[in-house]
Amino acid sequence: MLWATRISNIRFYQYHRPLLFTAPHNFRTKLNFSSFSQPQGFCYLDEDCDDFLPWLEQKAGAKISSVLSIGKSAFGRSLFASKSIQTGDCILKVPYSVQITLDNLLPEIKSLLGDEVGNIAKLAIVILCEQKIGQKSEWAPYISRLPQPGEMHNTIFWSQDELEMIRQSSVYQETINQKCQTENDFLAIKRAFRHDPEILGDITYEGFMHACSLVGSRAWGSTKGLSMIPFADFLNHDGATEAIVLSDEDKQDSEVIADRDYGPGEEVLIRYGKFPNATLMLDFGFSLPYNIHDQVQVHFNIPHHDLLREMKIDLLQRHCTPPIKDVNGFNSSLESFTINEVRSAKGKGKGLPQSLRAFARVLSCTTPEELSDLAKEAAQNDGRLARRPLSNRSKEIWAHEKLLLLITQLIEKYDATIKSLVPVNSPPMCGRLAVRMQMARDLLSGELRILKSASMWLKSYCTTLNTTAYHCEDVDDYRAIPG
């Protein structure tokens, strides 16, 4: 049994697509459960999808689920328990045979596409081809129920004015990068089909971007490759649950195991991944009011006027690992660092990233000899640079005060941006803008919370250095610092 891994336009994830900000519509038939009087997951059956599960089961030649129904909640289309579910129950099984994969790409199209076109784009072409066929497509009941462009709020669809609301966050640049990647894929596809344009028909960039976003927010990856899993992709997200989509290579299916009990009428949720709002907004088009997995990317640069700048950069490059991506796909480079929430010393959690503090310590050096001493220390400690407190207390305080100044400036910018956002309930605001403004508020508020926790930690650390005996071998231990 393997974890299925969700795929986005630029990253690999363990996730799934929700429609958390699609306004409910056509609320007509309330689920009728005789075993309870007041369901916790109050919902309505989605009559537009009455034929969906029977169609999929007929196509699969197997039972997909006997305990789930497609309904509508305040968050859009979702799956609800139609009968009691116990922890450990398998609540759905979708055979590989009814999943849309790259195997569905027509041979004449596959032969024209080179390696410069990514798998996301290739699977998007499958969707576009099926959309072109319309009701004659064998996948029509599924393709026709995929979200329309106006229903999607991924940041790639935001206007420049809307993106300005989140300029403070790293997701702003991530969105720009993703747009560039999509444009490059589109141009490569257009070049590949320039001699036979009728294969795909009149494909537009907007249509291609929409198809790529559908794949990026819904597809899963396993040893089988990219897969879009009908029915399973009606499940919505809960970042705290342990339920995920699993791939069983022996049984050749994807399944979900309940991680808790559900009563009839309750919405059944899975976890797409431990993702911050930045990732959820970029790849899924929704945010959470309070996301326990929020994080912030900060940039800490060596000033160009620093006389030792080249020496410091050389030292950092020699002793730092190459740029990598964290679990959520964000780049960690020489001057870019990801901060998670810093919790009280009395509870669980860690302080600021050691790599960030090491960078600040290198930055505090004012002589070549100090840099040389750090290099020697690193050689004696598995190559780890400046991971211990500096022997000079004043320099150690200076380094962390520089960090505190950076964090304080970011806090002020985040505060100002949040205050500038118009209240969501303002009468002139259209529905789309209201949704995206709330997403921006959720994103920025979460990242501000992370920054404030880092600020408190730094203030506590500097206070400790100023008021206690200085022992560089243990003052770096976060647990020894009062919260």
Image: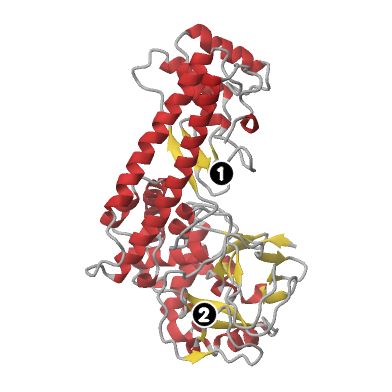
The amino acid type found where label 1 is placed reads Asp
Q: Is residue 178 above or below residue 87?
A: above
The reply to whether residue 428 is in sight is yes
Which percent across, then down, holds residue 402? 43, 25
Q: Is residue 219 left or right of residue 441?
A: right
Judged from this view, the residue extending furthest toward the left is 428
- Label 2 secondary element: helix
Which percent across, then down, holds residue 211? 43, 67
Q: Which mark is residue 326?
A: 1
Locate the N terminus by quadrant. Answer: bottom right
Instruction: From the viewer's side, name the closer residue of 95 and 378.
Output: 378
Q: Which mark is residue 41?
A: none
The reply to whether residue 201 is in sight is no
Q: Is residue 279 above or below residue 150?
A: above
Instruction: From the viewer's side, name the closer residue of 57 and 122.
Output: 57
Residue bearing mark 2: 142
**Cα separation between marks 1 and 2:** 34 Å
Give the quarter of the image for residue 209: bottom left
Q: Is residue 322 left or right of residue 298?
A: right
Judged from this view, the residue extending furthest toward the front is 467
The amino acid type found where label 2 is placed reads Tyr
Which percent across, then down, holds residue 373? 57, 10
Locate the C terminus by quadrant. Answer: top right
What residue do we see at 60% from left, 16% from top?
A: 469
Instruction: From the viewer's side, name the closer residue of 129 and 463.
Output: 463
